[in-house]
Amino acid sequence: RGSHSVETITLLLCLKLRHPHRITLLRGNHESRQITQVYGFYNECHRKYGNGVVWQCFTDLFDYLPIAALIDNTYLAVHGGLSPSIHTLDQIRILDRFTEIPHEGPLADLMWSDPDDDKEGFSVSPRGAGYVFGKDIAATFLEINGIEQLIR
């Protein structure tokens, strides 16, 4: 978001190309066609390039970004949080990420869910997508998968 989003994502992509083993870019909830239209990325691309072709190229690229990263078999990095439909890392690995982020389901949950220290279990998110989940959910997921920490 912001007036230099095109330059920012271009720089990040160049850094990824220059240092492919040192930089990992993860997909988040803003790397979708709908959200980029709502929050101005489409308008920025159209303003700077005169049409939507660059926006289409970026959003097509976003479909190929990983949705999570396992670091040293110890830490799981994900943009949002956990899903009541996902209990294991293998369930994340088999998700079809090569698509637009849906409004609901496990992929949407990984993009939109939020932790809340004051909650237990899962509850519907006030943001209208994903869930709010408590420490108990995070602790169970970490234990089942033999990892130490969830990183957002």
Image: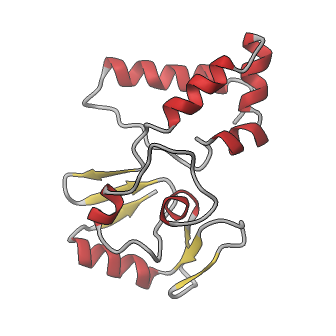
Q: Is residue 116 visible?
A: no
Picture quarter with the N terminus: top right
- Residue under the image location 43 percent in, 37 percent down: 64
| Residue 130 picture location, percent across and down | 59, 67
Model colouring: secondary structure
Question: In the figure, residue 88 lies in which quadrant?
Answer: bottom left
Question: In the figure, residue 30 lies in which quadrant?
Answer: top right
* 87 left or right of 108 in image: left
| Residue 99 picture location, percent across and down | 51, 45
| Residue 80 picture location, percent across and down | 52, 59
Q: 119 above or below 74? A: below
- Residue under the image location 29 percent in, 58 percent down: 75
Q: 94 above or below 119? A: above
| Residue 82 picture location, percent across and down | 46, 69
* 82 left or right of 148 in image: right
Q: 84 above or below 63? A: below
- Residue under the image location 28 percent in, 31 percent down: 22
Q: Is residue 126 visible?
A: yes
Q: 82 above or below 134? A: above
Residue at the farthest bottom position: 120
- Residue under the image location 27 percent in, 63 percent down: 90
